[in-house]
Structure formats: C-alpha cells, structure tokens
Image (cartoon, rainbow, N blue to C red):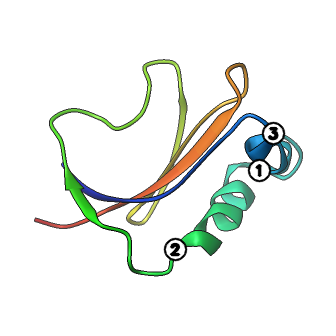
Amino acid sequence: MRFANIVFLQDESADEVLKIITEQGEEAGLKHLSQWDCGDAPIEEINGNPWGLYDNIYQKNNYIMSYNNAVGYAGLIELIPA
C-alpha cells in the first residue's frame, strides 16, 4: 500500500477532532483533518494497514481516517495509486 501520512494527532492534540467526530460525525472529522493536507507529505509504502486493529476507519475517496476514542488519537492518510 502506498500512502501519504497527512496528519496524526494524539492525547490533547486529538481532543478537538475526536469531539467533532462524536458530535458531528466521521465526515466532519475527516474534513477537519484534511486541512493539514498541503500536498507535500512524503509517500510511504508498507505491507498491511497503517492503522491499529481496534481503530475506527472512515474512508472517502482517497482519504482514510483512523481514530480511537479510548486511546485518544486520530490520523489521516491519503492513498496513492500505484
């Protein structure tokens, strides 16, 4: 899988986006995180998934948001076509 790691927030830094997800839904959370997409994130390649086994996943177009309220983090990646 090829992807660009747009943003990863944890602990207090993730509080705002986790609140947005809880109150307004996953699409609003993804929109909030996408403001960090400046088009300059390095492309990475891994085998498997760049999110945890117990993460919640929301995908829209080439964006994948993963988040975990219990642990307190949220991240956004962009899939890069091969």
Indicate whether 17 appears above or below 49. Answer: below
**In-image side of 13 versus 27 (left or right):** right
| Quadrant housing the C terminus | bottom left
Q: Amino acid at mark 2?
A: Asp
Judge by depth and name the residue closer to the eye, 46 or 56. 46
Distance, label 3 to label 1, CA atoms, is 10 Å
Judge by depth and name the residue closer to the eye, 56 or 17. 17
- Residue 56 circle label: none
Q: Residue at x 30, y 67 (%)?
A: 42
Secondary structure at badge 2 equals: loop
The mark lying in front, picked from 2 and 3, is 3
Indicate whether 24 appears above or below 33. Answer: above
Indicate whether 2 appears above or below 19. Answer: below
Secondary structure at badge 3 equals: helix
The residue indicated by pointer 3 is: 12
Q: Amino acid at mark 1?
A: Val
The crowd level at tag 2 (other Cα within 10 Å; few <14, some 14-19, many 20+) is some
Q: Residue at x 30, y 35 (%)?
A: 49
Q: Position of residue 17 (x, y in %)?
A: 76, 50
Q: Position of residue 14 (x, y in %)?
A: 74, 43
The residue indicated by pointer 2 is: 37
Secondary structure at badge 1 equals: helix
Residue 18 in view in this figure: no
- Residue 17 circle label: 1
User: Dividing the picture into quarters, in which one does residue 40 lie?
Assistant: bottom left
User: Dividing the picture into quarters, in which one does residue 19 lie?
Assistant: top right
